[in-house]
Each structure stands twice: as structure tokens, then as C-alpha cells.
Image: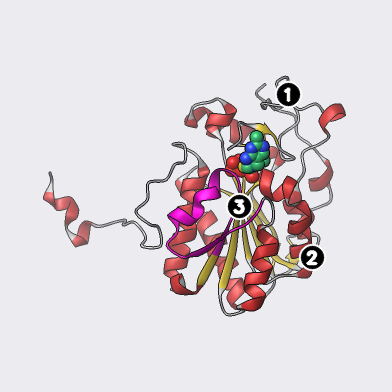
Amino acid sequence: MNTDIVKPENLVYSRTKVLTDATMHYCPGCGHGTTHRIVAEVIEELGIQDQTVGIAPVGCSVLAYNYFDVDFQEAAHGRAPALATAVKRLNPNLFVFTYQGDGDLAAIGTAETIHAANRGENITMVFVNNGIYGMTGGQMAPTTLVGMKSATTPYGRNVELNGYPLRLTEILATLPGTYFVTRQSVHTPAAVRKAKKAIKQAFENQKLKKGLSFVEIVSNCNSGWKMTPVQANKWMEENMFPNYPIGDIKVEGKLVEGIGLDRLVVSSPLTVK
Ligand SMILES: Cc1ncc(C[n+]2csc(CCOP(=O)(O)OP(=O)(O)O)c2C)c(N)n1
Ligand SMILES: [Mg+2]
């Protein structure tokens, strides 16, 4: 072993103490693991480990409470924002964050999500959008792209039969209760840095009692998409990003200039069938 690499002056990275030692069950290349890491790093950097409560969802991240070394509550399907509302209102000095996938947040829990945002609950919501119900076998989610194959749309999502992809993040940005709404990804080092900055901003807003901060992370689900991690990231860039554009949507309570209603109504065709 080269002992140089363990000298303190050579240390460039160490695992945050806000993650437990449990080995994550996520597939290699999936965005959940990286998203967990940056949420945990933000909690450590803000020094709020013993004041933070996470709310875990159903879906691949159902076991989030095993991976974060902070207090956690497990919510019933889709109900994380409702549970977060209760935890935050009873303990306003705690930092409360939800962590959900697209099936959980944008299908099963649509009502809880919209109403928590519309009430302007002072919480942080992290939303991992991988375009399908990953954990249960890759069924179509509201976020599944037009033409995208899933376990329940084997010939691709058909608008006549299945409707259009739902951009819940844009919808939430139109509600007066949201203060910060952004869409990020974690598939490159630069993207990870930006996503972490957004998550930090979301927690800082909570400290300032600004209302709801919402961070969508567009992720691949390479197992569910039946691709290698590298293929899945390429497919994500070519197909998910045109439909789910990366960047801030609402900052300090105001829609970012140039974010028009076309964001809500235009659907980009798949480039790769
Ligand atoms: C057969 C079956 N139907 C429904 C459920 C309930 N359920 C648990 S996880 C899940 C999907 C969650 O998908 P998503 O929120 O997108 O999270 P992901 O796994 O993709 O991260 C559903 C519907 C279940 N466990 N089993
Ligand atoms: Mg999903």
C-alpha cells in the first residue's frame, strides 16, 4: 500500500459522518446513492445533524432511514409531505426534509405534495425523478416520457392511452407557497456540485423560514431502463433533460426569467427509441 495516500495533507475526500456504515442497496450508477451522499454532506456542513428529521418514502429509497444518521420517520405511500408538515409544525426549530421518488411523490402522493407546497410549509423536499416506478419493477409513472418503454408500456408510453408526462416541479413553482424550486442531476462531478449547492440552499431557506424549497434530481434507473449505467446516463441526457430541463425554476419566491408556460405544455420526442 502506498502510505502517501493516507497522509492528512493528501486527503481530498472523506465519507461524511451523517451517512451510517450500512452498505447501500442501490444499483451501481443510480442517482439515489449520490443524492443521499450530498444531502448528508449538506447536513454535516450546516452542523444540523442532531436537529434534522428526514421523512422516508416507499420506493427504492424506502430504506433511507438506514443510511442517514439522523432521526427519521417512515411515511405511508405518498404521504411524506403530510408527515413532514406535522413534524415541522410540532417542532418548528427542527430541519425537516422529505425524500421521495416520482411514483411516490407525483402519483401516489400528488395531493399531499401540491397542498404542502400551496400551504408554504417550511420544509425541504428532495424528489428523485427516474421516470418509472423503479422498486416495483419499472412500471409507468406520471413522469414516464412519451414513447418510453416501461413494464406497463412495453411498446412505449402512448399519449392516447396514457396521457402526457407530468411536470409536477413546474406546477409547484406556480404556487405562491414555494420559495425555491430547482431541477438538478447527479450524473457528472459538475452536476453533483450544482445539486449539492441547491440542496444546501434549500436547507438554508428553511432556517430563514422562507416556505417550501423543492429540489428535483433527474436520475437514471439503469436496471429499470434495462441499460448499462453509461448508456442510461446518455439516454437521460438525450431524452429526460429535454423534457425535464435542468436549472432553477423559482428563486427567492420568483419564477426565473424566461421560464414560460411552454415548459408545461411542450413534450419533446424521444431521440433514442
Ligand atoms: C406490486 C406492488 N405495487 C405497489 C407497491 C407500492 N409501491 C412501493 S414502491 C412503489 C414505486 C415507487 O416508485 P418511485 O416513487 O418512483 O421510486 P423509485 O423506486 O423509482 O425510486 C410502489 C408503487 C408495491 N410495493 N408493490
Ligand atoms: Mg421512480
Q: Is residue 225 left or right of residue 36?
A: right
Magenta stretch: residue 210 in it? Answer: no
Disc 3 crowd, CA 10 A, few/some/many (<14, 14-19, 20+)? many
In this view, 268 is above or below 44: above
Q: Across the whole image, how many numbered discs are drawn on residues?
A: 3
Is the residue indicated by label 3 positioned so its CB lies within 8 Å of ligand 1? yes
Q: Earlier in the sequence, mark 2 or mark 1?
A: 2
**Rendered image quadrant of residue 178:** bottom right
> Which residue was labeled with disc 1?
156
Q: Nearer the viewer, mark 3 or mark 1?
A: 3
Please state if 185 lies on the left or on the right of 24 as rendered: right
Check disc 2 and give the amino acid type: Asn
Residue 91 in the image, given as x and y percentages of width and height: 60, 78
Q: Label 3, label 1: how many angstroms apart (C-alpha)?
A: 27 Å
Regarding mark 2 in the picture, which secondary structure is present there? helix
Label drawn at residue 57: 3
Q: Which residues are magenta?
A: 54-76
Residue at point 37%, 50% (across, down): 22
Between the residue at mark 2 and the residue at mark 3, the CA separation in whole angstroms equals 20 Å
Find residue 118 and name its label: 2
Front disc: 2 or 3: 3
Q: Quadrant of the C terminus?
A: top right
- Residue 13: give x, y in percent of width and height: 32, 56
Q: Provide the secondary structure element on which disc 1 rests.
A: loop
Which SS class for mark 3?
A: loop
Amino acid at dot 3:
Pro
Residue type beneath disc 1: Gly
Q: Residues within 10 Å of mark 2 (few under 14, many from 20)?
A: some
How much space separates mark 2 and mark 1, taking CA atoms?
A: 33 Å
Q: Above or below — where is 80 with respect to 145?
A: below
Let me know if residue 130 appears in the view: no
